Image: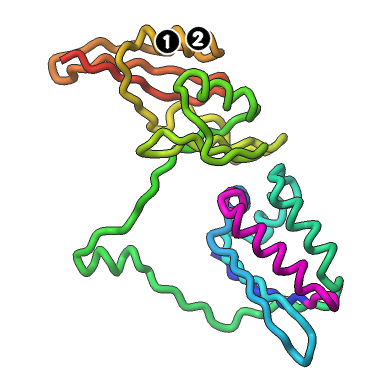
Amino acid sequence: MEAYARLIKLKPGSDARVAQWANTMNARKSEAVATLVDEGVDIESWFSLELGGEQYLICYMRAESMEKAQSALSQSAHPIDAVHQQFKVDTWVRGAGAEGRLLLDLQVARTSTAHARGRGMNARNPIFIHYVHDMARARRFYESVFDVKPSFASRGWTTLDFGAFELALHILAPGHTDESPLPHAGLNLQVDQIEEMQARIEAHGGAMVELREPQSRVPDRVATFRDPEGNGFELRQHVG
């Protein structure tokens, strides 16, 4: 994991533009977080300060690889990245910043510490992620088959509200090979009738891969399907 910090000098009179950018990024935080997933970034924090009457920003990041993060950013299809790039053009003084040199990096392994003290981890808001080539096609499939609505939608990242969890559709950038549609992401949904859902799935471009009838130890019918993007999921029907 790499740490990165940079001091950025701002053009005079940038206060209002900085406030506008910060408000936009906070309002569209789920989009911004989606870009961090692509870039392999765990933490990105921004601070403002005044030095000698001049306005500055400080950017702090922690990522798997800063080189990978920059490469992913250059190929980003997320609209929020275009917003950020325009902000840089509007407010940053080119060549006037400075990159920090790391002197000390302290971390607490909180997960290990928690387990050592006998406590469990804290986790919440589960999501399943399906990687897709065509966002519009993927949205049509899931919204039509399962009658769900997006809690957030963009060209690069869409989350569909299933109630107890969200299914995220993540666009694959052209030529990006680190991720691909998953044969199975662990998504399993209970339905009343598998055949009824099969008809809807096939009508919207999906296909059944396998149907397993109830057995002595598994009193459910379980069907495996593929969506039009190639992602796998299961439907189960309880039969007693």
Name the side, left or right, on which 144 lies relative to 193: right
Q: Quadrant of the N terminus?
A: bottom right
- Residues at marks 1 and 2 touching, judged by CB atoms closer than 8 Å: yes
Query: How would you classify the magenta stretch by its main secondary structure?
Result: helix
232 in relation to 221, above or below: below
Q: What percent of the width, then of the height, locates residue 148?
A: 47, 28
Is 12 one of the magenta-colored residues? yes
Helix, strand or loop at label 1? It is: helix
Q: What percent of the width, then of the height, locates residue 48?
A: 67, 77
Q: What percent of the width, then of the height, locates residue 228?
A: 56, 19
Q: In which image quadrant can residue 85 be found?
A: bottom right
The mark found on residue 164 in the picture is none
Residue denoted by label 2: 202
> Along the line of sight, which residue is nearer the eye, 139 or 117?
139
Residue at (79% x, 77% y) in the render? 9
Which residues are drawn in magenta?
9-34
Category of crowding for the residue at label 2, using alpha-carbon neighbours closer than 10 angstroms: few (below 14), some (14–19), many (at least 20): some
Residue at (31% x, 23% y) in the render? 190
Residue denoted by label 1: 198
Name the side, left or right, on which 211 lies relative to 141: left
Q: Name the residue type under label 2.
A: Glu
Q: What percent of the width, then of the height, locates residue 107?
A: 44, 74
Helix, strand or loop at label 2? It is: helix
Q: Name the residue type under label 1.
A: Gln
108 in relation to 159, above or below: below
Q: CA distance from mark 1 to mark 2?
A: 6 Å
Residue at (35% x, 25% y) in the render? 189
Q: In which image quadrant can residue 68 be found?
A: bottom right
